[in-house]
Image: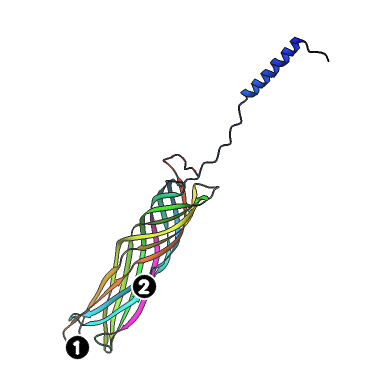
């Protein structure tokens, strides 16, 4: 075997060393960036539509003469239902990967109404019959609520939440009360309308699709109580030449309702924070 000349051997060693050094200087491939973790933090606004129905309860009343004679008393189940729809705006903040808190205000147009008609026998005079016709309406209502939610395990874009707070709205009621007896009838009609306040509570689930993380869909239930409606109905009557009597009826009607609604929200974050780690 022939030996390589010394100069040739030196060149081979230098080239090999240069190649090894160049390989060491070649930058390593940058690791692939992970997608940002989903966060519920942000201001949002949206619309909703749903259905409201009566929350049970009883309306009741009584009628007396001016001499305090009890003419009749009644109790009737209260029922009302109708379509609701409106909009909401709020803010949510994700404290941990699983805990979300926030606040929301909404306003609803409402067609929740109910009409009832019933008959009761007389008390002081059993031959009398008292007829009652009642109609109640919730024309609109709004709420101001806190929200506390938890994300679904393994699904950070699914939020289960509870909510509750202050409620207000426009309620109205009309009532007709007449005492019918053998020789005639007497009674009267009353109407009430006002903006009343109360409370609300409920919960729901909200989902933000991965392809559109700024949007979310929700289904929500709320119980809302705007307080009872109290009103009086009165009239004056006389029998033949007898002294005139005053007939007074008092009616008390609840204005609580259940609401189930679906909503669509668009969320944005004007106060960016560091992302929440999964």
Residue extending farthest to the front is 1
Question: Looking at the image, is mark 1 or mark 2 earlier in the sequence?
Answer: 2
Instruction: Residue at 45%, 54% (x, y): give it.
Output: 47
- Above or below, 253 against 240 in this view is above
Residue under label 1, please give it.
240
Q: Is 117 contained in the magenta span?
A: yes
Magenta region: which residues? Answer: 105-121
Q: How is the image coloured?
A: rainbow
Residue extending farthest to the right is 1
Task: Give the alpha-carbon distance from disc 1 to disc 2, as whole Å.
Answer: 38 Å
Q: Secondary structure at mark 1?
A: loop
Residue topped by disc 2: 78
Counting from the top left corner in percent of width and height, residue 108 is at 39, 58
Residue 136 image-quadrant placement: bottom left
* Residue at figure coordinates x 65%, y 24% from the top left: 23
Observer-side mark, 1 or 2, equals: 2
Q: Main secondary structure of the magenta part?
A: strand
């Amino acid at each position: 075997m022939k030996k390589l000349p010394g100069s040739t051997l030196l060149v081979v060693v230098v080239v090999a060393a240069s190649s090894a050094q160049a390989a060491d200087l070649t930058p390593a491939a940058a690791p692939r960036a992970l997608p940002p973790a989903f966060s519920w933090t942000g201001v949002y606004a949206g619309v909703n539509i749903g259905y409201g129905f009566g929350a049970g309860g009883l309306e009741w009343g009584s009628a007396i003469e001016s001499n305090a004679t009890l003419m009749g008393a009644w109790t009737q189940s209260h029922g009302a239902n109708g379509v609701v729809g409106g909009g909401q705006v709020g803010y949510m903040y994700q404290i941990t990967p699983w805990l979300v808190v926030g606040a929301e205000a909404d306003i609803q147009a409402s067609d929740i109404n109910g009409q009832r008609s019933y008959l009761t026998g007389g008390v002081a005079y059993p031959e009398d019959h008292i007829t009652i016709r009642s109609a109640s309406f919730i024309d609109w209502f709004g709420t101001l609520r806190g929200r506390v939610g938890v994300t679904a395990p393994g699904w950070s874009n699914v939020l289960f939440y509870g909510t509750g707070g202050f409620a207000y709205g426009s309620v109205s009621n009309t009532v007709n009360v007449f005492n019918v007896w053998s020789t005639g009838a007497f009674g009267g009609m009353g109407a009430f309308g006002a903006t009343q306040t109360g409370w609300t509570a409920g919960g729901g689930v909200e989902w933000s699709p991965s392809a559109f993380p700024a949007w979310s869909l929700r289904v929500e239930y709320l119980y809302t109580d705007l307080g009872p409606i109290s009103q009086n109905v009165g009239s004056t009557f006389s029998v033949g030449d007898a002294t005139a009597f005053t007939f007074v009826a008092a009616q008390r009607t609840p204005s609580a309702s259940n609401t189930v609604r679906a909503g669509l929200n668009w969320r944005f974050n004007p106060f960016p924070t560091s992302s929440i780690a999964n």
